[in-house]
Amino acid sequence: MKIPDEKFMRLAIDKAKQGIRELQTPFGVCITNEREVISCTHNIVWESMDITAHAEIHAIREAIVYGTRIEDAKKLGFSELTISNKEMKKFGNSQIEIVGDFLRDENLKLFELWYNQENKRVY
């Protein structure tokens, strides 16, 4: 299994922090192809008023590397995603490798940063 480069996860973490500053929810994503960034963004559900504008949904077919778990998001009140990426992969015939809990502690700090905001909103 190929281990993802930390710099790409750190770019996603930076995007999530940017989203938090813009009163979005604490999710960021960095899509890469080998060593090149294709897209790096954060969740824009509240900004766009588009319920499909989740950062992780944009990335799910391109690169499934994540830093926190569904259970972590549920603890903060996010409950729209109830099936894991690994389970979704079983339903399709995907060749995508899934790497979980990558830089988990740093990613959990994003939830803490968001949670401590006065103007936070859960959708």
Image (cartoon, rainbow, N blue to C red):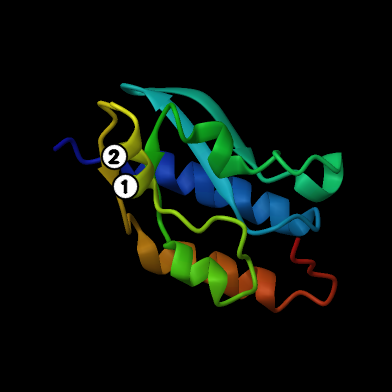
Secondary structure of residue under mark 2: helix
**112 w.r.t. 10: above or below:** below
Quadrant in the rendering for residue 105 = bottom left
Left or right side of 65 for 37: right
**69 w.r.t. 93: above or below:** below
Q: Residue at x 63, y 59 (%)?
A: 26
Residue type at mark 1: give it.
Lys
User: Which dot marks residue 90?
Assistant: 2
Tally of marks = 2
Q: Callout 2 environment at 10 Å: few (<14), some (14 to 19), or many (20+)? A: few
Residue type at mark 2: give it.
Lys
Left or right side of 85 for 75: right
User: Which dot marks residue 5?
Assistant: none
Quadrant in the rendering for residue 1 = top left
Q: Residue at x 60, y 42 (%)?
A: 55
Secondary structure of residue under mark 1: helix
**75 w.r.t. 43: above or below:** below
Q: How far apart are marks 2 and 1 (CA)?
A: 7 Å
